[in-house]
Each structure stands twice: as C-alpha cells, then as structure tokens.
Image (cartoon, rainbow, N blue to C red):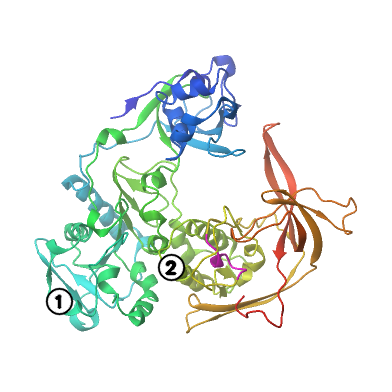
Amino acid sequence: MAVKSEPCAVCAQVLLPPPEARTYKGTRITPLGQSLDVFKQTAQTCFICNLVWNATEQHPIAWETAQFDDWKGLEYHIEDVCQEELDSAPTEIQISVFYHSPLTDDHSEVETCGIDTLFSLRILERSTASESTLSLAKSWYLHCSEGHRECASTQDRWLPTRLLDVGEHGNHEWKLIIPAEDMPQHVEYSPYMTLSYRWGPNHDFLLLSETVLGFRSGQAIREMPQTFQDLITVAHYFGIRYVWIDCLCIMQDSAEDWESEAALMAEVYSHSACNIAAVDGKSPRDGLFRDRDPDQLRHRTMPSSICSAEVTDYYVTRMEYFQRQLDPGTLMERGWVLQEWFLAPRMLYYASRQILWECHQPIAKCEAFRHAIPYEYTLKRSRYDLKTVQRDMDEEYGLLTAEEANTWVRLVGRYSRCDLTHPSDKLAAFAGVAKLFLRASGDSYLAGIWKSRILHELTWVVVPPKARPSCGYRAPSWSWASVDGPIDMRSPKPLHKAEYWVEFIDASVESIGKDATVGVVAGLLTLSGTVLSCRYKRAGDFEITLSAEEFPAGTTPPISVWIDTLDDHLAELGQVHILPFKKERSRKRNAARDGFDVVTETTGLLLEPIDADTRDPKE
C-alpha cells in the first residue's frame, strides 16, 4: 500500500499546472515563490523536495547551514512522457530537478524522479530472514537459472580448487573439500554459491596451515561467524550444497597459494551459481539478515495533470533507486567486490532494508516492487553483451569495439571510486574483468589501457586527486592504475571523432610471470608529436595562463590543469612542457539561454622532463 503525498506550492506549479500553462515533454520550469526558507519547510512535507534535501547523507546538514546567498532556486525539466494518446493521462513521466548544491560553490546538480501509474507493490515482512523473503529470493534464482539462457554459467564442469561442503538442509556441520580429490568423477556437477563481504578488523576465522586439518575433518556451523552461518542458511534453502568463501578456500598464510588462487578469481565467480552480497555488514560477525520497518519502503503517490487536463495519482520513485538501496559506504565501495559483481552471473544482495536481485537481464529486482525496479537498466547486462557483441566491418578481432570501449570506461570509473585495503592490488582486483575483455576482443592490455584505444584512454583525469600511492610502483605513470582517486575517462564518441595531433608509435608493459593483467614492473609508451615549452602563471587552484611566442596574443585564456596526485604542485610562476593531444567538439550546457552550446575543446598532456641517463626505467 502506498502513502498519498501532496506537492508543495512550488512543485504543484510543475505537477498541477493550469490549463493555459500545460506542461509537455521538453518543458523547463522555474516556479515562482521560491526561497531557501520555503525550501527548508517544504523538504519536510513534499516528497520531491525531500528527494533533493536527502540527495546524499551530507546534503541535509549542508542544507541546514546554507546561507540565503547560496540559494539559486529549483529548475524542473520534463524529460520524458509516455502516453497512449495525445492529451490522455500519461502512464509514465520523468522529471529532473536542477539545483545549486550546498556542498559546492559552482556546480549544478540534478535529482531525477519518475512518476508512474503502473507500479505493482509487495507487502513486506519485518525481517529479511523471513520465510517469505527466502522464498522470494529462491524464486528469483530458479526463474533465472531455469529460464535465462544468457545467465547460464559456462557449460563445463569447472570447480574451484577448494569448496566448503555444508551438506543438505538440516545439516549442522561443514568441512573443507578439494573437489579434484573428494568428489568422484562420475558424480554429476554440483553448483556452488560464493560470498561478497567485508573482512573488517580482527578477522581471524581463516584457512591457515594450522587450521587446514581441522577444517578438512569438519566443524560445527554454529561456530562460524554469523555472515557465514546466514550464507549457509540461504544455500540450504536454495538446495545448494557447496559454498566458496575466500578466507576459507585460500591459504591465508601462503603467498604462493594466494597468487595462484587470485589468478583463478575470474573463474570462481564466473562459474558461481549465485553470489550473495552482505551489503550492510562491516565484518563477518554482522550477518546477512536485518530487521526493518516496512513502512520506510512504502512508496509515495502524488497527483499530476502534466500533458492532460485529468488529474491522476502517480507513484513517485527516485531514479537510480537500485544503487541507492545498496547502502553507500559499505560493501559496494570495496575494490575486489566490483569484479565479483561483474563476473558472477547472478547477484543476490542483502541490504539494510530489503533484498535485491541482479543478473544478465537488463532489469533489476527488489522486494519493494513486485515485478521489476522501474527506470533501472543495469550495467551488469554488459557482461553478457561482451559474449554476443556484433563487430562492424571496421571492428576486427584484436580491436576493442565502441560498445566494449564504452563499457570499459564506465567500469573503470566505477572501480576507481572503490577502496582497497592494499593499494598494491589495484590491477589484481580488476584482473578478472580485464581477462573477460581480453577474451572478447583479443586486444592488447597495457596495465589498464587497451592498445587499440590508447589515444582516447590516455586522456584520463582524477577528480578529485588524492595523495600519491605509498605502495610503490604498480603501473606506468600514463595508466590510471598508477594513481588513486575517481577517474574520469570520457566515453568514446564514434560519431564525433576527435582530431588527434599525436601519433601512437608503440607501447608495452613488463610483468612478472605470464599473466599480463597483474604484476606489472615496467612500462614504455612512445608517441610522436610537438611539445610546447611555455612560461605560465597560476590563475586559480587548478588553472594557468600561458605566455609564449607561439601565441599571437601573448597570453592564452585560463587553461584547466588536472593534476594526477596531491603531491604534484603548481608554483605561482614557472615553465611547463605541453604535448597538444587532440581537439574535439562537445556540448556544454548554457544556463543563461536554457540550452546547449557546441564548443571546441583542446586537450594536452603535461609532461615532466627526465634525465635519460639517470632515470629509473620503471618511471
């Protein structure tokens, strides 16, 4: 059952316009009567204003302390309308609310919501450990495993080096097994579950040289950390006898075993029947299941007459609902989890308020919506697309296609926002994803960069930069893997090709061992282009102006400079060496005329000269 909510006077000008001011797709409105004081009041009662107020965990505090001069007013855009006939009540509307963020000085942010008459909701129990929740999770699993061809695991008998045998429902013991030794060859392949979780501090329930014999003999399930016990509860309910948990299936006091098993991580998760994500847990002691207040998941309805004289009640939901349910700041920001998520054919998330489901279908599911989460098209679908992408005539095997390159860029951006306990794992924790792209494309992998797309992928920036990694060398400086912090690498635009001013000559990396995706110890990149040596003057924290004989006017307009780490400093005055790299056209929003301008952007690389006689070959 939904909760009816009335729009405030400001939002009502958008949702309930008078007939002479009827709004349609593409309409942009800045309602009258706005002020910071009004917004602070309506954010407590109006659902749409509340979405803006609670955009992130930091926003409510920032709004409370915002000053009058910070307020710029909300601007509403009717992005899309779905209606069967002109002037009939739409079945679906998407609205974006632009606002001046209280967290920054000069950045307009957007909160997008959808309103829909077609939602089908589910009545929830007060715990995710309930019989109805387990039954729902199992129904998702069975529907996918029996009916989704694209979600089927690789059709071979591959099994990990070690597994935990947890028996059947009602069994109270588990033991460590080695499938090659303990599972008879004539036994039909048995599926296994995997687990994504946070280790947390003082995690000591581990497979060690001193514990392996006891684990092989059998242990009581009740003595395991709670998350592992709950995982076994789910496995028993699903009818799955085997599970794989990294700390119990990899020797934690053997560097040799860890390196060997880490190389198999892509296979472990790719062949998993279902990966369970302990989203809300900070350690294995926290468990999977959570008590909750079902009322917090009840959806709101609001009236609207957009595109129609008829006032209709609509369900309102925030766009990116799925990601916002995954409790930012916990499991999903752990670096190793990204490849576990991307590689596993099925993901069952145990979050703080509900369970959610994701597979290679383009839609995601959760408890709160009976059928699927509206407006949610998952990036995980691209895992299946890598196997089926059709190459154009000019996209030969050995080259990353435009579709593959776009997916890679998005994955790198997402991965770069994750944390790693050991920064030296930067390439290792992403190696499983890289191997998937290697198999699909046949391209050459160069420490996070693809050879066929190297000119595009070299122009990454870090926003914002962080301190230089303390783990020592892990990738050449021209790779995003050499730094920490969120990477912005614009997706390729095949219809708007850049004009490059450099020529790629060659690139290579040197790795320890045969696996080129990890263990990088050196890299070499050769480009041909014209380097400009210019005097500069600081024009801001990250802006400079250049003075050189090459510029007729003597001084350039301010140029944005994106430094790689906080250890890279720009003096007030100095000399820089710039390699002009490319020129491309792009669209920039023009708030003054409520539209977009086509602008030409020039991108270059800032170079640091190195003494060829004394330089470290790894730099």
Q: Which residue position holds label 2?
A: 429
x, y (%) of residue 68? 56, 25
Give the residue drawn at x 40%, y 44%. Answer: 324
Q: Secondary structure at mark 2?
A: helix
Q: Is residue 213 left or right of residue 267?
A: left
Q: Quadrant of residue 57?
A: top left
In primary-sequence order, the first of circles 1 and 2 is 1
Per the rendered image, the range of residues in magenta is 477-484
Question: Residue tagged by mark 1?
Answer: 214
Inspect the image, locate mark 2, and give the three-letter code of the amino acid beneath it: Ala
Compared with residue 344, is residue 298 higher up or lower down, i.e. above or below? above
Q: Residue furthest front?
A: 572
Position of the N terminus, as image quadrant, is top left
Q: What is the CA distance from the residue labelled 1 to the residue labelled 2? A: 30 Å
Seen in the image, is 586 located left or right of residue 219? right
Label 2 Cα neighbours within 10 Å, binned few <14 / some 14-19 / many ≥20? many
